[in-house]
Amino acid sequence: MTKRARLLMAIAAILPAAAAFWPLWEVRLGAPQYPEGLGMRIFAYTVKGIKPNDLDNINGLNHYIGMMPIHPDAIPELHYMPWILAALVAMGLLAAVVNSRRLVLAWLGVFATLSVVGLWDFWRWEYNYGHKLDMETAIIIIPGMSYQPPLIGSKQLLNFTATAWPGGAAVALGLAFVLATLVWWTSRQRRVAA
Amino acid sequence: MWRSSVRLWSVLAVAVAAVGCKPPAPAELVSGDAAKAVYVAPGQYDEFYAFLSGGFSGQVTVYALPSGRLLKTIPVFSQFPETGYGYNEETKPMLETTFGMIPWDDTHHAELSQTDAVPDGRWLFINGNNTPRVARIDLTRFETEEILQIPNAAGGHASPFTTGNSEYIVSATRFSVPIPNVDVPIASFKENFKGTLSFIKADVPGKMDIAFQLLMPGYNYDLGHAGKGPSDGWFFFTTYNTEQAYTKLELNASKNDKDYIAAVNWKLAEQCVKDGKAKAFPSRYAHNYLDPDSRMAKVEYGTSVKMLEPAACPGVVYLLPTPKSPHGVDIDPTGEYIVGGGKLATVIPVHSATKIKAAIAAKAFDGDIGGIPVLKYEATIGGEVQKPGLGPLHTEFDGKGNAYTTMFISSEVVKWKLGTWEVLDRAPTYYSPGHLMIPGGDSKKPWGKYLLAMNKITKDRYLPTGGELAQSAQLFDISGDKMKLLLDFPTQGEPHYAQALPASMIKDKQIKFFSLAKNTNPWVTRSEAEGSIERKGKAVHVKMIAIRSHFAPDNLEGVEVGDSVYFHLTNVEQDWDILHGFAVLGMTNAELILQPGETRTLLWVPRSPGVYPFYCTDFCSALHQEMQGYVRVSAPGAHVPLTANTSAKAKTQVGRLNAVPATPEHQHGAAGGR
């Protein structure tokens, strides 16, 4: 790989570190009674309300439908996701340092797998929150109704419109993937040309 | 005071109407675009917050301008069952005085705190007229947070006007009384009765105190205003009853051709006090302060004030002769002109700050009263507005060189020019205005767009409501050469004076809820698991939370007839506008209204055995009607065990809301198993 390609790979490798600062995903809730909106930001390591008490208030509202409260500490993924991302950064940097195009490919493979598994896992959590309701303590019971928030886009859940979209860290991850793919692809063409 | 003289004024007004030309019919005065000028579309905000004194309601009402919509009543000196102010244990101390707990007062003058002689949006001050007190209202909470009683005074009318940086607010005694107040014949007025002008340190919340009092001749002190610019460092107070009448004042206090405006050099007074020229004067007075974290008020009593006699501090006061029982004393934005409102005068006299200073330097005195020099009228007067109307009372300014004065008897607002003293415009009011208000109109920088006249008589302005009518405020557009009537709207109590500021100055500083984490009330209950009941002799303390849509605990047993039951409720919500209320069947008390995150305590003494329901009184959620509970009351000595159970439903919610599941598998498994 050229020096430039290696530098780009290093940048791609560092980009997932954005997850230390920015959320992976954002879910916003709006309702007639909540003109100011409620929302949460899902980070690699925790879930935070957009406003200081939003998470408690969302949990407070969810008790009406029997939804499990969201307790970030009780979600194991949030404990090991930072390590996975750190490993991803380390592996990407290694590929740049040892100048291995195969390692770049391996990195892309791991990255793609993790992304698919991660999104599926996120979807599974949303599914469980939305479907596995505690009917014993649910106050509002509508037969057949489930409350799974959307993975991306908007959905009406009773009086709330839930909207979800990727956060800054997800964008950085996407960029990292594109960049590394580009590095891998352009390096191959150079070699063929040589 | 105005109500009593209404009849006389009305007779005079009729006489004036008979000789003058017929005033135009109201409908002719409103031009076509008035509706548009005051229409604030749903969801839109008004331009100004206006704080109107409630007069005999004892409160402050907050209106939005230009729409005239009522936003809120802020309880100050009167108990307010609507929220429990003055009824619950936390706020009862706010109404304590050396006379005991007083459930009512008469508010007159709203005064915004200032920085560099311009309203700054920190606080609103308001006076209690009957039992002299001043209150501070915090403008991030719209709540009374401090009340100071003024000793050695009676009728705190000239209050609570502020100095340019709210170093001091003042309170002058309206009634002269024996000082100290002792048992003497009323006929000994001239020997024994005195007035006081109090300067109150006001710039630190929780630390309001009497800085010093100035002992003055036994007159009635009416209104005041601080100087600025060339009059900076001076405070002006109007006096009437310089005749020192003590009976039939209507007649006997209206004899002198001129009364006085007292000009007080407050910076010199401050220096004299610092130099030890004031005497310690034993005085008992209450200071009540609501701590912002515990949200509990407590009372402290002062024992002494510094009393400064003018003779001990030469040059601290001068008297400016001013025609006919002056009421308002208003200082124009530049600080040069001091406008007297002689309510029985035929002119509006305007003193000049420059001329006052020159007169003092030249010793242009016309004798003295008890060592206080009286300046010559000709030496201080800057001009007189001729034929302004009848009964000039109060003046405010638009910052463009114009002054606006209310005419109580001829029922109009008169616009005139500073310097040339010519009358530029007049607009009828409906009827008999007292104060008028231009946002910032008594300050260095008025927002001279609107003028609000506060009328004392309403008569036929609205749909009639029996013998007692709301008073009426009228909004004028003063942005052009001519005043344009835009709107009138009914008001609560008797708004004497009002102040207003642009909404943008305070609207984004509003707190949305109180932080539960910062709640330092000793009876705070932060979670359902902490709810409890305990007995200390005849007192039973219940710690209870309120959250949508239940109380916890909600079943209480073991209470006996004659117990003092203290319900310490905490609203554990941390969300905007989610309030809860609390009331018990048969309680001889007002309800509690709980803002999110705050703790409030209701005292209830059950008088007969039985089961007493309680419920949430503020419609909080879809299941508000389910938000209730029961207290079992047994006969004295029944020894039913003291228990505070939560309902089965609340119990499971306790577990769900507070316990953190160990693993998601457990969580999902539990849910899946059901």
Image: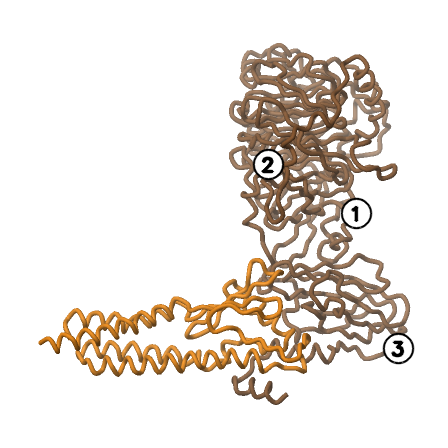
Chain colours: A orange, B brown
Label 1 and label 3: CA atoms lie apart by 37 Å
Left or right of residue B5, residue A189 in this image: left
Tell which tag, 2 or 1, sits nearer the viewer: 1
Q: Position of residue B593 (x, y in %)?
A: 72, 58
* Residue occupying image coordinates x 63% and y 25%: B483
Q: Secondary structure at mark 3?
A: loop
Label 3 and label 2: CA atoms lie apart by 58 Å
* Residue occupying image coordinates x 86% and y 63%: B586
Identity, as a three-letter code, of the amino acid under mark 2: Tyr
**Residue marked by disc 3:** B638
Q: Earlier in the sequence, mark 3 or mark 2?
A: 2
Q: Chain of mark 2?
A: B
* Count of number-bearing discs: 3
| Dot 3 alpha-carbon crowd within 10 angstroms: few under 14, some 14 to 19, many 20 or more | few
Q: Quadrant of the N terminus of chain B?
A: top right
Q: Position of residue B152 (x, y in %)?
A: 73, 35
Mark 2 and mark 1 residues within 8 Å of each other at the beta carbon = no
- Say which quarter of the image contains residue A83: bottom left
Left or right of residue B627, residue B205 in this image: left
Q: Chain of mark 1?
A: B
* Residue occupying image coordinates x 67% and y 30%: B197
Q: Earlier in the sequence, mark 1 or mark 3?
A: 1
The correct choice, above or below, for A65 with respect to B426 in the image is: below
Identity, as a three-letter code, of the amino acid under mark 3: Ala
**Residue marked by disc 1:** B103
Q: Position of residue A18 (x, y in %)?
A: 35, 69
Tell which tag, 1 or 3, sits nearer the viewer: 1
**Residue marked by disc 2:** B168
- Say which quarter of the image contains residue B636: bottom right
Q: Quadrant of the C terminus of chain B?
A: bottom right
